[in-house]
Amino acid sequence: MLGAITDFTGDLVGRPNRVSDWLDEYLPAVPPAAYLLFFLIIPILYAVYISFFEYSATTIISWNFTLEHYEQLLFDPFYQGLLWYTVRLSLIVSAFCVLLGYPLGYFIATTTPLRRQLALFAVFLPLMVGTVVRIYGWIVLFATNGVINTVLQDLLGFKIALLGNTLSVTIGLIGVYLPLVVLPVYSSIEDIPDSLVPAARNLGANQLQAFYKVTFRLSLPGLLTGTIFVFVLTMNSIVTPDLLGGRSDLTMGRLIYDSAVNGLNWPFASAVGTILTITTTAMVYIYFSFVRDRMGVSEWD
Amino acid sequence: MGLMAIMSVISTLLTGRNSRSLSAPAVFAGRALYYGLLGLAVSILVLPIVIVVGISLNPTQSQAFPPTGISLRWYQEFIASSFFDPFFFVSLPIAVTTATISTILGILAAYVVVRRDVPFENEVVMYFISPLIIPPAIIALALMITLNFNFLSFVPTSAKLVVGHVVITIPYTFLTAMTAIESVDTELVEGARNLGATKFQAFRKITLPLMKSGVISGFLLAFILSFTDSLVALFLSSGSSTTLPVEIFLFLQYESSPLVAATASIQILLVLVLVVLIGRLIGFKAAAVSS
């Protein structure tokens, strides 16, 4: 009875400090918190832990401490090249996602409601439809007897190899991750008060200056979020480079998949994952600090 | 600084002296560039889907686009194909179970974060959306290794898939539930409490019905993400418990046929219906922002 009133008096007495009060207050959040602890945090720590042990062909992990996986990954030129390829691919994909995603996000934020609904649908549906389905579309388009090559054959009489190279991987990844730039950019441009750009124009800025100094500056948080998502996910991509790329388009993600699922070398796969995550986090941090310091996103929270 | 200098150089090149506007050709060029990039972006998003649906209508083995004729042959073949079972007996039940568990966990977490006085609230929110920040490949690898302990050998593969999918969908159900609970007026809840309802009764009779559309949207988002996931499932699938996207992935490594297009089109149709439903319930913007 009178629950709300006792809550109120409870607040007057002081913040809950006994265990039962604490449980009463936070009990509903215990199952989800425990779930993530057991099925996310602990598994990841365990994976990092086993990356320091030897691989054994019979028991997968033999419990002898070693740094050989890390030595191999950091000093073997093959794996250095792999990491460099992955970083370069992610940078290119992120850059193109900005180039294509920003105008689309701007369009969605500034157009009429009906067009906005249609455009949002055109962005949201591909995001939801799943990677494999969209990659299949690119395969059919790029294949030796695919849509583009059939047209080329009919018109010009020759075919070009479009599938199985870095270009097809790049295009596929841009298509897969483009919505992740469009949506946050749209959201942050929509939040800009409508009066700011006309005000800048009144004060003497031309269209380009008004866009750069008002719209672009204020949409930086959205752009930052979007590019970080694209970069991180491209660094970890497996399915797209596997289906659209050739043998040489080996990313760190594919290396994880190959060594963990096909090779059953879990310690090595975990070491790859650890190196990949450290590299990704470092690059995201550098990028984040650069944008924050140089571009003046000061009110970032 | 550097970028700004370049921009100002460009803008002085584009304008007449002391002019408040860009020159007409500059405006025209800007528009052309803008619409060009816009068209490219939309086509890179929509083209693969249109092509998949188009190919699935081909009457023959050929994967021609536009299709050489209109037939539903490949949809008939889908029913007898090796994609039918993964679709209806693996992916569908896994997605429903995942969405149910994930929605419940998401609401519980969101309820406490929004309604209770949580210390370190930003950090707690970060914790619940951490599966969004940690790359799925890492989550999948870690779960695969951990769920393969000998004492967990009794757990069926499908249950492991549900475990993994719940992890990657919790941020979505959590964020949609947070928005939904925030939209419920606390005075209504206090009113119910003053009239004698317990905290749980107030939640079940007031908060939950009022946040219904948010809850359903979160459920549908989780369903779609689980159904279409090809990354976590790639690590956790095995044998007869292989989800549809992984089945397609493995198939595409060796061959490609309009059968895949038909299967993919059915998946597209399913997602399309659910996406329209989400748009109706909370609008694409809310759904998009929480993704």
Image (tube, coloured by chain):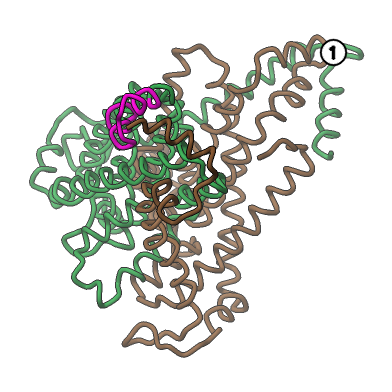
Chain colours: A brown, B green
* The one of B46 and A230 positioned closer to us in this rendering: A230
Q: Is residue B191 magenta?
A: yes
Q: Can residue A143 be seen here?
A: no
Total labels: the figure holds 1
* The one of A22 and B68 positioned closer to us in this rendering: A22
Image quadrant where one finds the C terminus of chain A: top right
Q: Amino acid at mark 1?
A: Gly
Residue at the top extreme of this rendering: A202
Q: Quadrant of residue B250?
A: bottom left
Image quadrant where one finds the N terminus of chain A: top left
B23 with respect to B132 (left or right): right
Q: Quadrant of residue B146?
A: bottom left
Name the residue at 64% across, 18% down: B31
Name the residue at 84% across, 12% down: A203
Q: Is residue A53 magenta?
A: no
Q: Position of residue A138 (x, y in %)?
A: 39, 43
A153 with respect to B88 (left or right): right
Q: Position of residue B240 (x, y in %)?
A: 16, 61
Name the residue at 13% across, 43% down: B78
Q: Label 1, on which residue?
A: A204
Crowding at mark 1 (Cα within 10 Å: few <14, some 14-19, many 20+): some
Q: Quadrant of residue A126?
A: top left
Q: Position of residue B133 (x, y in %)?
A: 51, 51
* The one of B61 and A158 positioned closer to us in this rendering: B61
- Tell me the SS state at disc 1: loop
Name the residue at 34% across, 37% down: B221
Residue at the bottom extreme of this rendering: A64
Indicate the chain on which mark 1 is placed: A
A85 with respect to B202 (left or right): right
Q: Position of residue A32 (x, y in %)?
A: 37, 51
Q: Which residues are magenta?
A: B189-207
| B59 lies above or below B213 | below
